[in-house]
Amino acid sequence: MRSVPALQNLFLLLVLCSGAARAAKTLDIYFIDVEGGQSTLLVSPSGQTLLIDTGYADFSGRDADRIAAAAKLAHVKRIDSLFLTHHHADHAGGVANLLQRLPVGTFFDHGPSVETSGETAKLYQANTPLFAQGEHKTFQAGEAIPVKGMDVTVMVANARHIDRKGEPNQFCSGLSPQEGAEGENPQSGGVLVQFGKFRFADLGDIIWNEELALLCPENRVGKLDVYLTDHHATHVPPKAIYALAPRAIVVDNGPRKGGDPEALKLLKAMPGLEDLWQIHFSIAGAKEANAPDTFIANVDERCQGLYLKLSAQADGSFTLYNPRNKYTKSYPAK
């Protein structure tokens, strides 16, 4: 029979282990450097994974290697769900390379490419047979992407937005649609991810008209904790995005793609913003428009391809980590 002190010590150990287990249950997001494309790996507290886009093909499988490296850091060996926002080469180009490194459970896309000729059409034709390596589903605005441990809602797809009410958006004043873009970008899917009180949005490559439709006259997304810039910040978005009120913004730019100086200035002026983080230093942005070096994963054009990592708790608190300089910033729950 164990003594009372021994039982007390055992109980204390179990409590500590239980507390450590609870503390470890975070939503982890890896913003992967694919040189101006997109690839974002989300690891749910359940251990299930959602990968949004695959970056480029070629470059000796560079982008797939970086995805696989992030997966290894996260201790995951498969992609449960692959969400392809649209069929452009900087988002869907790396599907074949990815499948050489990691299995995929379910492939999600918005349906066939609307660009029926040229390189995008060829890429879609090449990717389509690969979807047979898992389950293949199409998504529509308003649908949920099943990932155990977090809620993932499709906010935009096929040039349509989710049909739900939102708060009136004061930043819509004076804004109107522009000459519409054609092709795959307006078709782009985008998601809102919620883990408890934490809210993150990745709206893919939608641009002005789609942003405006989603956010005006009502903000159908709601306020965010973290916002991944639409279309790599290659364009100046409407000020309607100010209603998103994120505490932190992540820009998935490359050294010479994305990170438009005027876009960065507009984003940095967002009311309530605490920090702007970037995958790359934008050469076009120079010192004036870029975030401070502390918040940039890759400051040189020829770089190691470093990521940014976000870890969120269900109470809405989160941290962002830059492996280049080992800098971590914590954002307490509000």
Image (cartoon, grey):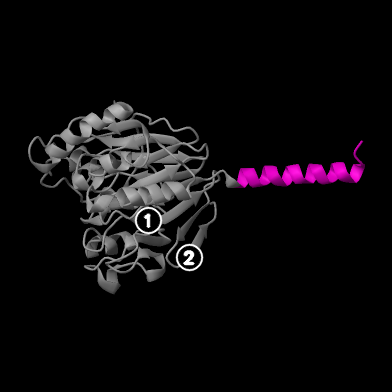
Q: Is residue 278 above or below residue 88?
A: below
Q: Position of residue 107 (x, y in %)?
A: 31, 32
Can see residue 291? yes
- Closer to the chain start, of discs 1 and 2, is 1
Cα–Cα gap, marks 1 and 2: 16 Å
How many residues crowd around disc 2 within 10 Å: few (fewer than 14), some, or many (20 or more)? few
Q: Position of residue 5 (x, y in %)?
A: 89, 46
Residue with the mark numbered 1? 249
The answer to whether marks 1 and 2 mark residues whose Cβ atoms lie closer than 8 Å is: no
Residue with the mark numbered 2? 327
Q: Amino acid at mark 2?
A: Tyr
Q: Main secondary structure of the magenta part?
A: helix
Q: Position of residue 193 (x, y in %)?
A: 41, 40
Q: Amino acid at mark 1?
A: Ile
SS for dot 2: strand
How many residues crowd around disc 1 within 10 Å: few (fewer than 14), some, or many (20 or more)? many
Residue at screen point 31% across, 55% down? 252
From this viewpoint, which residue is outermost toward the bottom?
Answer: 287
Q: Is residue 213 above or below residue 267?
A: above
Residue at screen point 21% across, 59% down? 257
Q: Which residues are magenta?
A: 1-23
Q: Is 255 in the magenta?
A: no
Q: Nearer the viewer, residue 206 or 24?
A: 24
Q: Nearer the viewer, residue 76 or 189?
A: 76
Q: Nearer the viewer, residue 320 or 203?
A: 320
Screen quadrant of the N terminus: top right
Q: Position of residue 100 (x, y in %)?
A: 32, 40
Q: Nearer the viewer, residue 42 or 93?
A: 93
SS for dot 1: strand
Residue at screen point 39% across, 43% down? 222
On the picture, is 315 further left or further right than 129?
right
